[in-house]
Amino acid sequence: MSRSSLPPQLRQLPVSERIDLVERIWDSIVEDQSQFELTDAQKAELDRRLAADKESPDRGRSFNDVKRGLAGDKWRFKSSSIQNLKTISPAHITAY
């Protein structure tokens, strides 16, 4: 969204209030998530990823391991290479 596409009255709010507004909007979306259904393609992709994880459970790193590694600000993701956070490998992460 470009600067010009945001209504002026919202743009004039302090950043902290805009952040609060975004959080409240996100919370309302989470509350209404039952209205959204995955597409057949999304379901198929999730099934493919679960099957790949079952075939090679030791491949990559667990999400908890990745979070622990990021907690110390020692790592940064190569975002273009991440496809599945459950099976992320060291090749997807670079040291600062």
Image (tube, rainbow, N blue to C red):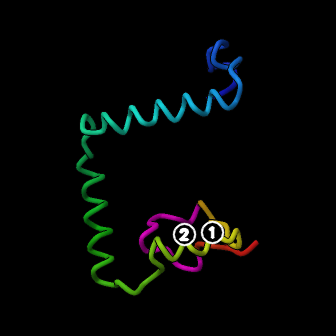
Q: What residue is disc 2 on?
A: 67
Left or right: 42 in relation to 96: left
- Answer whether residue 54 is magenta in the image: no
Residue range (magenta) = 80-91
Across and down, in percent, residue 64 comes to: 47, 73
Residue sticking out furthest to the right: 96
Across and down, in percent, residue 66 comes to: 54, 73
Rendered residue at 71%/17% (across/down):
12
Question: Distance between the Cα atoms at labels 1 and 2?
Answer: 6 Å
Across and down, in percent, residue 90 comes to: 58, 80
Rendered residue at 47%/64% (across/down):
83
Crowding at dot 2, Cα within 10 Å, few <14 / some 14-19 / many 20+, comes out as few
Quarter of the rendering containing residue 91: bottom right
Crowding at dot 1, Cα within 10 Å, few <14 / some 14-19 / many 20+, comes out as few
| Mark 1: secondary structure | helix
**Residue 11 against residue 68 in the figure, above or below:** above
Query: Which amino acid type corresponds to the residue marked 1 in the rendered image?
Result: Ala
Count all numbered tags in the image, as a single digit: 2
Q: Nearer the viewer, residue 19 or 43?
A: 19
Residue sticking out furthest to the bottom: 58
Q: What residue is disc 1 on?
A: 71
Quarter of the rendering containing residue 31: top left
Rendered residue at 60%/75% (across/down):
69
* Quarter the N terminus occupies: top right
Rendered residue at 61%/33% (across/down):
19
Residues at circles 1 and 2 in contact by the CB criterion of under 8 Å: yes
Quarter of the rendering containing residue 16: top right
* Quarter the C terminus occupies: bottom right
| Mark 2: secondary structure | helix
Query: Which amino acid type corresponds to the residue marked 2 in the rendered image?
Result: Lys
Across and down, in percent, residue 29 comes to: 38, 34
Left or right: 49 in relation to 1: left
